Amino acid sequence: MSDRCFACHNSATTREHVPPLCLFPETKDTEGGRNLRQNLITVPACADHNLAKSTDDEYFRWVVSTNLTANCVGTWQAHTKVARAHGRRPALGQAILEGAKDVTVVDSRTGSEYPTAETPLDSARVTRVLDLVALGIYRHHFDESWSGTVRVHPDFIVDIGPEWTTDVDVKRIVLFEAADRLFAPETKRGDNPDVFWYQVHESRMPDQCLMRLAFYSGCTATALFSRSG
Ligand SMILES: [Zn+2]
């Protein structure tokens, strides 16, 4: 079992960092020279599930490190590593910022207003990374690969489509608060919690498992593992 890829169950040829290594700042990119790469989690992976997603990783890092809910470690990472990466490959930054517009976000819970930029989001890429992180963490936590389906619901992305109404936002907050309550008693795991932590909620049903993933403290997502059909 240990030499099978965490994502596709083919033979593993390498080990992959979960979440991606690029999320964890190097010491030179931290305020006060902190070591935020302690006991990083790795899982067995095939070549396809290691190298193939490297550009998705950078995109994902951009999404979470520049997100409003990210903590100062994430913001710092955005100002150092992410800024350098875009300097080297301006096309990536341009692709991301194309179509960005200035907006004011109102936190429905506190009423606080934040000026920010709304950028078009490639949610398929974000979903691909989140799915792999969830599967990798499952492999790490339970020491076995998940063979059912997984769906990850990020709290840190708001899809403001033409059909967007306040109702959608209210529903999102209700789900977010339900997840908060459900996971409240569960241990937060991971040795670099300012960058990433996760919680596991083992369902009474053997075919289900829930996980909460958090990037830069504030960017949380809920993963639902189910074995249906
Ligand atoms: Zn694989």
Image (cartoon, helix red, strand yellow):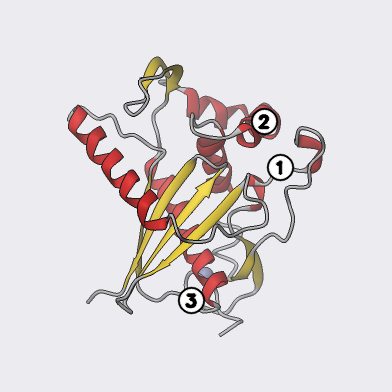
N-terminal of the two: label 3 or label 1? Answer: 1
Tell me, for residue 25, which label it has, or none.
1
The quarter of the picture where the C terminus appears is bottom left
Tell me, for residue 215, which label it has, or none.
none
Q: Position of residue 101 (x, y in %)?
A: 40, 16
2 vs 3, front mark: 2
Residue drawn where x is 67% and y is 47% of the image: 24
Q: Where is residue 176 in the image (x, y as percent from the top left)?
A: 34, 44
Image quadrant where residue 202 sits: bottom left
The quarter of the picture where the N terminus appears is bottom right
Q: How crowded is mark 1: few (under 14 residues within 10 Å), some or many (20 or more)?
A: many
In-front residue for pair 84/34: 34
Q: Does the residue labelled 3 lie within 8 Å of ligand 1?
A: no
Outermost residue toward the bottom? 1
Q: Does the residue labelled 2 lie within 8 Å of ligand 1?
A: no
> Circles 2 and 3: CB distance less than 8 Å?
no
Tell me, for residue 76, which label it has, or none.
2
Does 206 sit above or below residue 55? below
N-terminal of the two: label 2 or label 3? Answer: 2
Image quadrant where residue 208 sits: bottom left
Q: Label 2: state its secondary structure.
A: helix
Three-letter amino acid code at disc 1?
Pro
Does 180 sit above or below residue 46? above
> Circles 2 and 1: CB distance less than 8 Å?
yes
Does 10 sit above or below residue 17? below
Residue drawn where x is 46% and y is 53% of the image: 130
Q: Which residue does the numbered mark 3 point to in the structure image?
A: 145
Image quadrant where residue 169 sits: top left
Q: Can residue 126 be seen in this view?
A: yes
Q: Label 3: state its secondary structure.
A: loop
Q: Position of residue 121 (x, y in %)?
A: 40, 34
